[in-house]
Amino acid sequence: MTSAEGFFAPVPTHHAEVGTGSVPEPVEGPYTPILGVLVYVLSPDRRQVLLIHRVGRPDDQHLGKYNGLGGKVEPLEDVAAAARREVLEEAGVDMTALRLRGTVSWPGFGTGGEDWFGFIFVGEVDPDVTLTANHEGALTWQPLDRLLAFDLPLWEGDRYFLPLVFDEAVTQFHGVLPYSDGRPVSWAVTLL
C-alpha cells in the first residue's frame, strides 16, 4: 500500500434540477467570477448565528433578506483576510475563530447576471462585544434552528448549501448553483 492509499476517501457528488429556468450557457473563454466571502458567525454555544437583515438600502439586490456577513474579495487579499475584514466592517468586531466550510459557484447570480464564486466560512467572535449596525441593515442573533428551518426570508438557493455549512459530518463542500432571472435552476455539490 502506498502512502496515499487509504488516505483519500471516495468523493460523493449530488446533482439536482431545482428551478424552472434554464442553466445559463457557458461563455467562451475563462470563467472569471466575482470572488466573495460569506461568513456565518456562531455564538459560543453554537445555537445562534449572527445575520444581517438587509433593509438599509432600497436598491439592494438582497433587500428584505437575511444573510451572513460578507462581500467581495479585494485585490492582494486572501479569502481568510477578506472574511475577517468583512466581519469587522459589517459588525465592528474581530473574529476569534474562522473555518472554511466550502465554496459555491453562482453563475448568473448578480444583478446584471454576473457570476459569483463564494468562499463560505463559519466563525466566532468574543461573546461580550457590542455589535454595531451598518448601512446595509440590522445585525441580529437568530437561532440556528430557525435559519436551518428556513423560517426567515432567505435566498431561495440557500436551502441547498446552508445545511452543509453547519453539518459537522461534512469536512468541506464545493457546489455549483446557477441562477437565471433571480432563481436557482440547478444544484451540484461535491462533498469532501
Image (cartoon, rainbow, N blue to C red):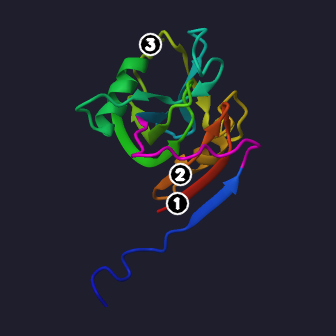
Q: If the image is split into quadrants, where does the N terminus sit?
A: bottom left
Of all residues shown, which one is farthest toward the front?
Answer: 28
Q: Is residue 23 above or below residue 11?
A: above
Query: Mark 3 is on which residue type?
Result: Thr
Horizontal side of 43 relative to 87 (left or right) equals right
What kind of element bears circle 2?
strand
Label 3: how many residues lie within 10 Å, few (<14), some (14-19) or many (20+)?
few
- The residue that disc 1 covers is 190
Instruction: Evaluate whether residue 16 shows in this view.
Output: yes
Q: Is residue 46 above or below residue 176?
A: above
Residue at image location 66% in from the left, 49% down from the top: 186
Q: Earlier in the sequence, mark 3 or mark 2?
A: 3
Residue at image location 44% in from the left, 13% down from the top: 132
- The residue that disc 3 covers is 132
- The residue that disc 2 covers is 175
Query: Mark 2 is on which residue type?
Result: Gly
